[in-house]
Amino acid sequence: MPLRVKSGSRRGEKTYLQRREDLEKRLAEDFEESPAGGQYRTLLERIDALRKPGVSSVEECRRRIAQEKQDHELQRRFSSIDAKRKKAADKREYLRGGAAAQAELKERKTALKKLTKEVEKEGETAISHLVSKGADPIDISSLERELEDFPKIRKGLREALSWSRLEEEKKAVFADVSFRREDPSLEPFERRIVAREETIVTEAFSSKERIRQSLEEILRRNVAHSDRTEVEALVSLLEEASLLAPRTKLSLARKDFPLERRKRREDFRILRRQRKEERREKLAWHNNDAGHKIALEQLHKKLGEALAIQRANREEIASLVRSGEAVLSSYFEGAIRTATLSSQGGKPNEAEGVSDVTGAIGGGCLAEETLSRVRVAALKRLWEGKRERLISPAVRASKKNAYREAERDYFAPEEVAEDPSLVDAHAMRLVIDAKKAGGVKEAERRDFLLHVAGQVFVYLFLIAFGIVVLFPFYWMLITSLKSNMEIRNSSSPAFYPGASEGYPVAWSNYAEVFQNFDFGTYLGNTLAIGFGSTALVLLTCILSAFAFARLRFKGRDALFTLFLATMMIPGEMMVITNYITVSTFGWVGTGQTRLQAYLAMIVPFSVSVFYMYLLRQNFKQIPEELYLAAKVDGKSDWRFLWDVMVPLCRPTLITIGILQLMGAWNAYVWPNLITSDDSFRLISNGLRNSFQTTTGEPEYGYQMAATVLVTVPLLAMFLGFRKYIMKGVGRAGIKG
Amino acid sequence: MRARNDWKAWLYLAPVFVVMAVFTFYPLVNTIGTSFLKNYNYTTQTNQGFTFDNYGIVLGLVPTRVRDGIASYETNVVNYAIPNTLIITFATVPISILLSLAIAIGLNQIKALKKVFQTIFFLPYVTNAIAIGMVFNVIFSHNGVFNALFLGGADKYWIDSTADRWSGMFALCTYIIWQSLPYKILIFCSGLQGIDEQYYDAARMDSTPRLKVATRITVPLLSPQILYIAITSFIGAFKEYDSIVGLFGRPETTLSEQKNMYTMVYYIYDSLAQPQNVAWACAAAVLLFLFILAFTVLSLQVSKRRVHY
C-alpha cells in the first residue's frame, strides 16, 4: 500500500492517518524488533514534523481570510448605517438653526410693535403737554427741554436733527454697500440680497431726509404750541423718526432671514457633498479599499508562503516516503526469499542479513501466511494509483528485468511460472527506482494532458446537454413560424423556417393568435392576480417573518414549526375543501363577478410559508445590535421594521416578488377550477384550451405562436432578474 | 417584557394566522373528515354518516353503485393512477438526479462560460409547464422531430391516436426529466460551491482519479443536498399533473381507452368536478398524503446512515 501524503484537510488527514496506522500495525507485527522498524519509525516522525507547521498555517491563513472578509462585510454595513444616522442628525441640527433665526425675527417684530405702541402712547401725552404749555414760540432747544419727560419722542427729535451726521453716515453706508456690490466672489443670490439692502438703506435715508425737511419747515414757521394740528404733525414726525431705526433694522433682519435660510441650505448642501465624499471614501476604504485589500493581500501572501512550505515539505515527504517504502520493500523481499527458502526446507543463504525477519516469521506454516500477505501487499502496491499506470512502460521494463533477475538469482523458472507475483515484489522496487530516475516529469506532463482531455470532455458533455435543454425552445420558435398545412402534411419536419419548399415562413400565425386568442384579457387577468397576490404575500410575509425573527412571545418556536410542517402536506389535501370554502363565500359559481374571481384566486394563496421562512432567515441575519440601537433611539418595532429591516432585506423581497409573479404566470389548476367565465381565466388556461380544429386536431402553428408569446415574457424576466431568481431558488437547498 | 410583547406579536401574525387557519388548517381537518362521509354532496352539504367505503371505492374494492344486481367499480385508480404515479416516480427521479448531478459536477469543473451554461441549464425552470408541455406535444407528434431524429421518420404515435400507455409514459417521463433538471442542477451547484476546496487540493496532491474524487469526496459531501433533492423530487413526482395537462390535454392517450394517463392528482381533480364524487377525491388525497408521508419517513430513516452532515 503506497503511502500517500495529503494536504491539511480533515478528510485527507484521516485517510493518511489510517494508512499510517495500518503500516504501523504491520510494522509492529512483522518488523518491530528489526532495524527496518526503527528506521521506518524515524522516517515517520520526520514526516510528521514536516507536515504539522505547513498544514496548520495553511488552515490558519484560510480561516483568517474568511474572518477578514466577514469582518469587513459587517463593518461596511455598520458604517453605512452610521452615515445615515449622522446625516439625519445633521439635518435636524440645521433645521433647528433655521428655527432659531425665525424665532429671533419674530421677537424683533413684537419688540418693534411694542415700541410703536409705546411711542404712540408717549406721543399722545406729548401732544397734550405741548398744547397745554401754551403759545410759546418754538425753537429747538426749548422743544428739547419741553420734551424732557418723553425720551422716545426726544430721541426722534435728535434723530431728525442730526443733519450734520446724516451726509457722513449716508456716504459711509453707501460706500460699504457699493463695495460689497463690487465683490466678484458674490453668489448671485448674495448679490440680490446686497441690492435689497441697498434699497432698504436708501429708503431709510430718504425717509430721514423727508422728516428733517418737514421738521425744518414746521420750525421755520415757528408755530405756537396752541395750534393742535401743528403739534400733532410735529409729534407724528418725531414719532416716525424715533421708529425709523428699529424699523430699518427689522427689515434688514427680514432680509437677513432668507439669507440665513439660504446660507443654511447652501451650507447643508456643501456639508452633504462633503459627507458624500467622506462616505464614498469610507466605502472605498471598505469596499476595494486599501485596508481590506492590504489585509487580504497579506493573508493571501501568507497563505502562498504556507502553501509553498507545504509544497516544499511535500517533496521532501515524498522522498522520505519513497525511501521508507524502499526500506520496507527490501525487507519484504528478504521475507519472501527467506520464506520461500524455508518453506522449501532449504537453508537461507542470506540468513545473516535478514536473521531477525526470519526469526519473526518462524516456521513453514507461518511462512505461508506471511508470504500470502506480502504477495497481496506487493500486488496492490504495484497496480494501485494513477502514477503506476502512467509509467507502465517503465513497469513493464522493470518487470521484465525482474523476471530475468529472478530467474537468475532467486527463483526457479517453474516457480515463477506457477506464481508470477513472486516477482512482482521485486519488480516494485525497480519501479520505485525508475520513478525516481525520470518518471516524475513524464507523469507531470501526462497529468497536464489528462487535465486538458478532461476539460474537453466536460465541455462536450455540457454542450450536448445544453443542446438538449435548449432544443424545445428552438423547436417552439420555428414551429410557430410554420403554417398548419406544412406541419400536418410534410412527413419530415424542417429544421429551420422556410426550409421546405412551397411553405413560406408563416408570420401570419402571430396575427392569427392576436385575432383569435384573447391575449389582452388573459394578460390583464394574470397581471392583476400576479401583482395582487405578490403585494399580499409580501405584506403577510414581512409581518409574520418579523414576528418570528425579532419578537419574543410564548409558543413562537412551536408555532413556527407547525407552519413549516404544513409545507410537507400536499396541496391537494387543501384544494378540495378550499374549493368548497370559496364557494361558500359566494366567490365561485354562476353569476361570478370579476372581483369575486380575483378574490378567489388571490386570497387562498396570500400566505406562503416558504417565503416567510426565507424572509425570517434573512431578518435573523440582521445584527441584534441594530434592533437594540433603534430601541435606544426610541423607535417602535413598527418603525424599525419598515425603516431598517425592510430596506436591508430588499434583495430577498425582490426575489420573493419575482417568484410569486412567476407563480401567477404559471398557475393552472386552481384558476381552471374556480373560474366559471372564460374571460376571468389566466394565461395558462387560455393557452391549453385554445386552437383545436373542430375535429379536435391541435393547430400546432397557432399553438406554438401563442406559446412563444407566453414563454418570452418569462424568459425576459428571468434574464433581467437572473441573480435574484437563482439566488432565491437556490437558497432552498442550503441547510439551516 | 415577555408578557408585554405577546399581544403585539399576535397582531403581527394575525393576517397570516387567519389565512392559514381558513385555508390550511381547517381544510386539512375537513378533508380527512369528509373522506369518511357516506354519499357526501357538497352542493347540498348532506351525508349519510360515517363510512370507510370511500377508500374502498377509490381502491376498487367497493362498487360505486349497484344497478339491477350488476356492480360497477372504479377501476381507473388501481389500474392506472397508482401504477402510473409509481412509474413516473421511479423512472424520472433516479435518472434526473444522476443526470443533474453529472451536469452540476461538470459545471463545477469549468471556468470559462460557466455563467452561460448555468443560465442555459436553468432555463426550463422559468417556463410555463403547460406551454412547454404543448411544445413536447409537437416534438412527439407522429410526424414530429423525435420520430425524424431517432426513428428515421417512422410514423409512430406517442401522444394520441394509436399511442398506447407505454408510449405515452415514455413521452411524459422525457418531458418531466427535462423539466426537473434545472432545479436539481441549481441546488447541486450551490451545494458544490459549499464544499471546501481543501478536499480537492488533497485529492490533487494525491493525483486521485477523477471518478474516485467524484464518488469519494463529492457525493458524500453533497449527500445533504442529494437527500433534499430526492425527497422533494419524489414528492413532486407523486403530484405530477400540470405536465400531463400540458402534454396530453386529457388523461388518456386515445379517446377510446380508459384513462390510462391518470395519476393520483389527476384523479383527484377529475373527481372534484362532480359534486357527488368529492368524498372520493378526499379519500384519494388522504391516500396520497399517506404515500408521501410514508415515503418521506422512509427516506429519512435510510438517510440516517448515509448522509453526512
Image (cartoon, rainbow, N blue to C red):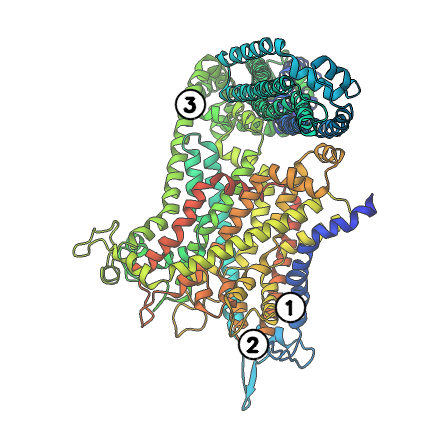
Outermost left residue: A502
Q: How far apart are marks 2 and 1 (CA)?
A: 14 Å
**N-terminal of the two: label 2 or label 1?**
1
B61 vs A680, nearest the viewer: A680
Task: Identify the residue at horizontal 41%, vertical 42% (top origin).
Answer: B120
Judge depth for marks 3 and 1 and give the one in front: 1
Where residue A715 sits in the image (x, y, percent)?
41, 46
User: Can you see residue A139?
Assistant: yes
Secondary structure type for disc 1: helix
Secondary structure type for disc 3: helix
Dot label at residue B31: 1
Q: Is A711 on the left or on the right of A99, as rendered?
A: left
Tag 2: residue type?
Answer: Pro
Residue named by callout 2: B275
Chain letter belonging to callout 2: B
Chain letter belonging to callout 1: B
Q: Are marks 3 and 2 on the same chain?
A: no
Q: Is A596 on the left or on the right of A488, as rendered?
A: right
Q: Quadrant of the C terminus of chain A?
A: top right
Q: Judge whether A77 appears above or below A535 on screen.
A: above
Tag 1: residue type?
Answer: Thr
Judge depth for marks 3 and 2 and give the one in front: 2
User: Can you see residue A346?
Assistant: no
Q: Judge whether A205 appears above or below A558 on screen.
A: above
Q: Judge whether B255 appears above or below B232 on screen.
A: below
Dot label at residue A448: 3
Q: In which quarter of the image is the N terminus of chain A?
A: top right
Secondary structure type for disc 2: helix
Q: Quadrant of residue A262?
A: top right
How many other residues sit within 10 Å of disc 3, few (<14), some (14-19) or many (≥20)? few
Tag 3: residue type?
Answer: Phe
Chain letter belonging to callout 3: A
